[in-house]
Amino acid sequence: MLNQPSEFKQGPKVWILAFLLLALLIAAYVVFEDWISGPSYPPRSPVVPIPRQHPNEPAPPAPSTLP
């Protein structure tokens, strides 16, 4: 009874395969991390709207620089 091998004990091949699979999963996550999380765009600066002017309206007068 004591000398019989346990049916749950695994050989070294199984542990090596399990370790390699774990390392492969970690490496795949590191390589594809950006692809998994989706595209990341740089933060945009706030958009300042430019007031539009009708082509037929005269331009506003320029500010005077004279004293």
Image (cartoon, rainbow, N blue to C red):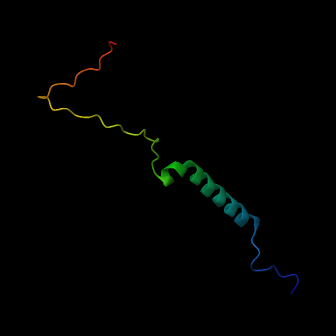
Tally the numbered discs. Answer: 0
Residue 12 horizontal side relative to residue 27, left or right: right
Rendered position, 33 above or below 47: below
Instruction: Identify the image quadrant of residue 6.
Output: bottom right
Instruction: Identify the image quadrant of residue 18.
Output: bottom right
User: 24 or 26, which is in the foreground?
Assistant: 26
Rendered position, 54 above or below 37: above
**The C terminus - image quarter:** top left
Check the image and name the residue furthest to the front.
67
Residue 65 lies, in percent from the top left, at 33, 15
Residue 46 horizontal side relative to residue 28, left or right: left
Residue 4 lies, in percent from the top left, at 83, 82
Instruction: Identify the image quadrant of residue 58.
Output: top left
User: 57 or 27, which is in the foreground?
Assistant: 57
User: 1 or 51, which is in the foreground?
Assistant: 51
User: 66 or 21, which is in the foreground?
Assistant: 66
Check the image and name the residue furthest to the right.
2
Rendered position, 56 above or below 7: above
Residue 30 horizontal side relative to residue 44, left or right: right
Residue 57 lies, in percent from the top left, at 13, 29
Residue 56 lies, in percent from the top left, at 11, 28
Residue drawn at the location 54% of the way across and 51% of the way down: 33
Check the image and name the residue furthest to the top.
66
Residue drawn at the location 15% of the way across and 32% of the way down: 54
Residue drawn at the location 67% of the way across and 62% of the way down: 17
Check the image and name the residue furthest to the left.
56
**The N terminus - image quarter:** bottom right
